[in-house]
Image (tube, rainbow, N blue to C red):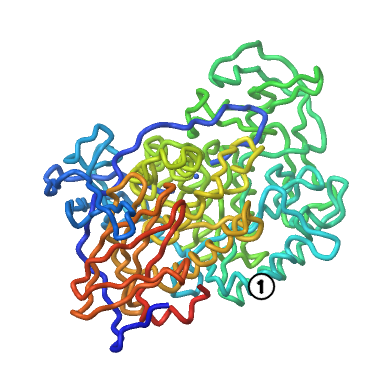
Amino acid sequence: MTNTPATPTTPKILTRPMGTGPPNRSGNHGRTPSFNTRGGESAGEWRRNVPPSSASTTSPGPSTTESPTSAPISTASERRASIVRPTLSFASAAGGSKVATSTTTKGNSAGNPNEPTSVESSGEEDYTGALNRFNKCGSSERNPLMMQYFEWDSLGDKKSSWWQKFEASLSDLEGLGITQVWLPPPNRAMVGDGRGYDAYDLWDLGEFPQKGQQLATRWGTKSELLSAIREAKSRGIDVLIDAVLNHKLGGDTKEEIRAVEVDPMDRTREIGKVETIEAWTGYTFKARKGKYSIMTWNSDHFTGTDWDARRRRKGVFKITGPGDHQGWNPRVDSELGNYDYLLGVDIDHRHPEVRGDFMKWGPWVLQETGASGGFRLDAIKHMDSQFLCDFLRHTRATLQRPDLFAVGEYWTSDVKILSEKMPNFRGELSFFDVPLHHTFHEASKAGETFDLRRIMRNSLMRHRPDDAVTFVDNHDTVIGQTLESWVGPRFKPLAYALILLRPEGYPCVFHNDLYKPDEPEVAAILRKLINIRSEIAYGHVSDYFNNRNCIGWIREGDETHPGGCVVVLNNSSRTLGIRAWVRTKGTNSEYVNAINPNMRIPVSRFGRTLFSCPPYSVAVWIPATSQYVNSLSL
């Protein structure tokens, strides 16, 4: 190890932005439509107005130089392209205005370096991003961080339920700096090992012997859930309830109803005549005996089903009677003509009894469980957007929690499509950055042929950072699922570095990657990145996006977290790096790689330094004199 300077000084990062950023990205990884399987979804956008006068100085094209070890580097300093920082104007449903800013770097899909990338939309309104309006960080003053604490196949064992396993892990989560946890749906499923997305009874959290089950759901009993949430709150960790409000499955009784079959690929086209079918649309919840809610459900409360029990045939059937049925809800996604129907029996959120029951359930489930974090909303692509806005506003007003957090799952891989849909939700929730996830998946498959400079081009993280909940993988993207789009283990550390160590968006870590990774190294690096996010990654960001296989950025640090860091990502088979400037106050200094502390580099008194990164890896360089070098678990 190299000795530190005789007179220790903590170099400060230069604040001026350097380098060119990722050019514009287009393309849509649309999912294969399937009318009888569970889909997925993803955050409040409004309109961005980039002044036409927002121009920056053009710079020479990319160049590379050799390091003393013959490692090609990205020389941001030689070209020093300015970063255009246009003002984003948004519209707020809550009234008032607040200006959000976003870093927009030069370059577009046509290769024109003078055109800033953007998601275009007409008009100009004022809007405060959902991540600014709603509380996402519990009682912590550190960078907030969400964790999805379950996988598709998660299950307790003979010794402890999943809720008990969660409670036992809270000490570790607290130590890592997790501030918010997304738990699986706590409601009663249609079958004993159902995850809760096959929602049967939202009012049963593991308290009643329904559907041939004992008290416990797949995840455990209600008392175990409440105990775990109490312990989480005592450690400053908020809990999100996964709300499955789109559909029901596991009806108790069949009903004769009138329905018409529609084309599953175009739900607006009827392919048969109105006829009588038998559907499982009766929900009586006898074991619950009206506790918490006296409502029972029948065909009046649904818009469609996928099973005719009389003729034992599958299809997509639009319910027309008996009673007053209005057909598919128009305030849903227009994929497949109208994507109101997803699976099971589809709930009609326009029905006054449905709305009344849900408006009671929202405040109740948060009060009953003590889950102060808010909601993760499932499958909102298929739901009445106006109902969701009303549901969230009512819950916040009832609980006197105007800052109650919510994030929605709206599954589309195209940021332009997602941006067009987000205004329908009036800024009442944030959105999972599904487009960014799909880019990670693409990059992990492409290897070093993927151009890292465009890693954020198709993302809410770039275009709607104040509404983006970023993630690398989740329970729906694992191999074998309908939305399979798994990010490979070699690229996963790079993806996590991007969402954890940059200021844009609000990151969510997946349970699998921390506790059951494809390779042990993934979890080891992830823990270090989480620690760095908690302790070091603060302050202004300057980008060095100049080499297709090696990009980086500088975090300046702040008064509470001085020193900052230099982050370098490399997706090639060679050692690469970026040459950057740090302020050294005229003295020699040294930086250490927080991912591999055996790597150290000197910094001259002039501050011009090569920050290298090993092949297919991440490097996070911090001043060797930083107070965190000895305290971090490096």
Q: Nearer the viewer, residue 466 or 625?
A: 625
Residue 299 lies, with reference to residue 371, above or below; the image says: above
In the visual, does 62 lie left or right of 295?
left
- The number of numbered badges drawn on the structure is 1
Can residue 102 be spotted in the picture? no
- Residue for point 73% across, 39% down: 297
State the image quarter where residue 217 is shown: bottom right
Give me the residue at 56% from left, 31% from top: 340
Question: At which x and y percent is residue 92?
Answer: 33, 52
Task: Report x, y in % for residue 239.
Answer: 59, 64
Q: Indicate left or right for 585 with 537 as reference.
A: left
> Quick check: 477 above or below 604?
above
Side of 222 where 22 appears, left or right: left
Query: What residue does disc 1 label?
Result: 230
Q: Work out whether residue 83 or residue 422 is closer to the camera in this orientation and state it.
A: 83
Q: Would residue 543 be visible to someone looking at this image?
A: yes
What residue do we see at 49% from left, 43% from top?
Answer: 444
Q: Position of residue 227 (x, y in %)?
A: 72, 70
- Circle 1 packing at 10 Å, graded few (<14), some (14-19), many (20+), is some
Location of residue 17 by image quarter: bottom left
Q: Nearer the viewer, residue 198 or 535?
A: 535
Q: Secondary structure at mark 1?
A: helix
